[in-house]
Image (cartoon, rainbow, N blue to C red):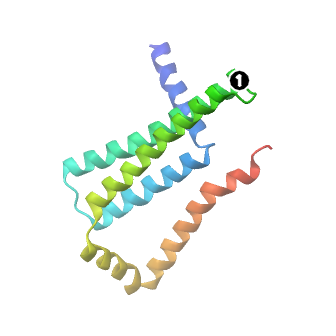
Amino acid sequence: MKRFLKGFAYAAAGIAHGFTERNFRVHICAVCFVSWLALRFYELSGAEWAVLLLTFAAVISTELFNTAAERLCDKVSPEKDENIRRCKDCAAGAVLVCAVFAVIIGAVLFWDTERFAAIGGYFCDQPVRFVFLGIAVAAAALFVFLPEKFKKR
């Protein structure tokens, strides 16, 4: 049982390591904002939520695989190598494919010009909501970009 639980600890450490990557933090922020908008302004069916959650999982998982591939490649071959470059490019490409399809899925689930107008009205009717949205976006930007400033060069 102890080994079984240790596996969860290792997995959690891997996810935590993902937060050291800027793109992972971008994806986490996107998940948070999309989830909030979906909960607040849309009445998604169970199937639509399943698609949305699977989309989140696919993007976050491929970002973690990309980070793992990059770390392994850097360890195996710290010097420039064409095969290592291709490996890293393929891993990054997998993330891009998932992210592009996530945007397409988001458009399919959320594209509704009337709802966009209602969302705009929600923020314009009470300017304090717009201020809080601005604060949330600024906090997300700090979460994404500030840790880069503290990385060892």
Asked whether 5 or 110 is in front, the reply is 110
Q: Is residue 80 above or below residue 43?
A: above
Where is residue 11? Give x, y as percent: 51, 28
Asked whether 25 or 126 is in front, the reply is 25
Residue drawn at x 43%, y 60% is 33
Where is residue 109? Give x, y as percent: 26, 58
**Residue 123 vs residue 25: left or right?**
left
Mark 1 closeness class: few <14, some 14–19, many ≥20 residues within 10 Å: few
Viewport quadrant of the C terminus: top right
**Residue 148 vs residue 17: left or right?**
right
Residue drawn at x 33%, y 55% is 104
Circle 1 residue: 77
Viewport quadrant of the N terminus: top left
Residue drawn at x 70%, y 51% is 148
Residue 35 picture quarter = bottom left
Asked whether 103 or 18 is in front, the reply is 103
Where is residue 76? Give x, y as percent: 68, 21
Q: Amino acid at mark 1?
A: Ser
- Marker count (numbered): 1
Q: Residue furthest front?
A: 82
Residue drawn at x 61%, y 56% is 143
Indicate the secondary structure of the residue bearing disc 1: loop
**Residue 132 vs residue 118: left or right?**
right
Q: Is residue 43 above or below residue 2?
A: below
Where is residue 137? Give x, y as percent: 53, 67
